[in-house]
Image (cartoon, helix red, strand yellow):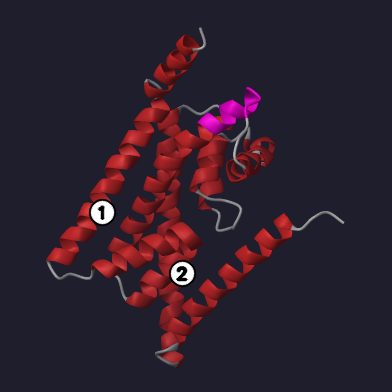
Amino acid sequence: MGTFPARRWRQQIMLSEESGVFAVGSLMLVAWLLAVATLWRLGQPWEQWVIMGFTELLLGRGVAIAKAVEMGMRPGLVVFLATYVDAVTVFLLYPVLILAARNLVAGRPVGPRMKGLIESAEKNVGRFAKYKIAGIFLFVWLPFLMTGVVVGAVLGYLLGLKTWPNMATVVTATATAAACWLYTYDYLYGRLAQIHSQIPALFTAGLIAALIAHRLWAEARKNRPPA
């Protein structure tokens, strides 16, 4: 008797808009891997794509763009890759998080990291409720550690936005933010390079070290037993 509801539940997931988002994200990831492999085969600087992609995944958009500018990547390519990596990330994680959110409502267990992302979005529902799409755009664009494409997309879901308008808003906001970061770093690194050619590289290394230290401190604080 229990198999029929489980099968019906799986069918609902497969036919949902979230599954379509996940499929698009999977195709985009494959396309990115094929592009890197093609660059490697042609002897082009494929490692810049990999470095920027992993830096963005691990440390965020701002640090990834700082590293890309320091490596001398072309401005248009930097904005495109930053937007593309964020889009792949949100297209793959958003469906999983929405399923987790529905499980929370149904009282089913959810992993602590997913629960933390959902709770982070829930904290901002009241502040952005009346702004809807404009609020999601601003939330994703803001250069703070607690904002970002994944939490922004979940916030859009909690505010009642339809799936594809939500995805379009998040991707547009991250592209705009990437262009702003690029302009800021390009101006800043140009000034720093006038002092000494190695200062931009040292600045990037310091930025990465500071963010890693902050992440480790935040994790240690989160796992510290209550007094």
Quick check: 211 above or below 130? below
Location of mark 2 (residue) = 184
Percent across and percent down for residue 141 are: 51, 52
The C terminus: image quadrant: bottom right
Camera-side residue of 193 and 40: 40
What x and y, as percent, mark residue 86? 41, 51
Residue at the (37%, 33%) spot, across then down: 21
144 or 177, which lies in front? Answer: 144
The magenta stretch spans residue 76: no
Mark 2: give few (<14), some (14-19) or many (20+) Cα within 10 Å: some
Residue plotted at (37% across, 72% down): 69
Q: Secondary structure at mark 2?
A: helix
The residue at which mark 1 appears reads as 33
Q: Distance of mark 1 from mark 2, alpha carbons?
A: 29 Å
| 1 and 2 marks in contact (CB < 8 Å) | no
Instruction: Say which quarter of the image contains residue 191.
Output: bottom left
Q: Is the stretch drawn in magenta largely helix, strand or loop?
A: helix
Indicate the amino acid at tag 1.
Leu
The residue most toward the right is 227
Q: Amino acid at mark 2?
A: Thr
Q: Which residues are magenta?
A: 99-108
Question: Looking at the image, which is closer to me, 49 or 37?
Answer: 37
Let me know if residue 74 appears in the view: no
